Amino acid sequence: MASVFTKIINGEIPCYKIAENDDFIAFLDVNPNAKGHTLVVPKKEVNKIFDLDTNTYTNLMLFSRKIALAMRKAIDCKRIGVTVIGLEVPHVHVHLIPLQSMEDATFQKKVVLTKQEFEALAAAISTHL
């Protein structure tokens, strides 16, 4: 069965897309730790990050860096945190989280945003790519 991320990639589920290329997609997390929390996902469905081939792994990190640099320009934060956990969805994904404090990286605190706020954030980040 396809993961929720594969369904997003295939256009079956909508997302607040920031960027994509032939191999990766970046979109806002709809249950964010902080305003601008973004997921970067390879289009090839692989469960665990270290099961990716070396080329895909390296390019995932390069694509994530590109997105993080754009986020840093669009969002007022102390830094962009990076984490890969992968327990909630069996499809590799990198969390890029704008951080003001360590609390933003705990996955305990969630931020609620409107559809308009998500759309504006996705557009703001995209303009810096």
Image (spheres, rainbow, N blue to C red):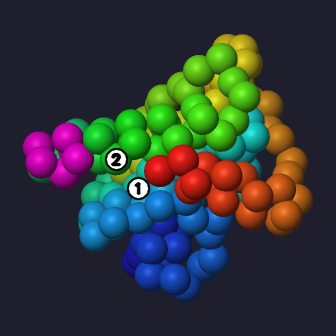
Outermost residue on the bottom side: it is 12
Residue 15 shows up from this direction:
yes
Q: Is residue 63 magenta?
A: no
Tag 1: amino acid: Val
Q: Residue furthest front?
A: 127
- Of circles 2 and 1, the one toward us is 2
Alpha carbons under labels 2 and 1: distance apart:
10 Å
Q: Which kind of residue does numbered mark 2 sit on?
A: Phe
Residue 115 shown left or right of residue 129 in the figure: right
Name the N-terminal-most of marks 2 and 1. Answer: 1
Residue 45, located in which quarter of the rendered image?
Answer: bottom left
Occupied quadrant, residue 33: top right
Measuring 59% from the left and 21% from the top, which residue is drawn there?
Answer: 79
Q: Residue at x 12, y 48 (%)?
A: 55
In the image: residue 128, left or right of residue 34: left
| Residue at image location 30% in from the left, 39% down from the top | 61
Q: Main secondary structure of the magenta part?
A: helix
Q: Position of residue 114 (x, y in %)?
A: 88, 59
Q: Residues within 10 Å of mark 1 (few under 14, many from 20)?
A: many
User: Residue tagged by mark 1?
Assistant: 41
Percent x, y of residue 54? 11, 43
The single residue placed furthest to the left in the displayed view is: 54
Does dot 2 land on a helix, a strand or a loop?
A: helix
Magenta residue span: 54-59
**Residue in the image at 75% along x and 40% along y:** 35
Question: Residue 88 got which mark?
Answer: none
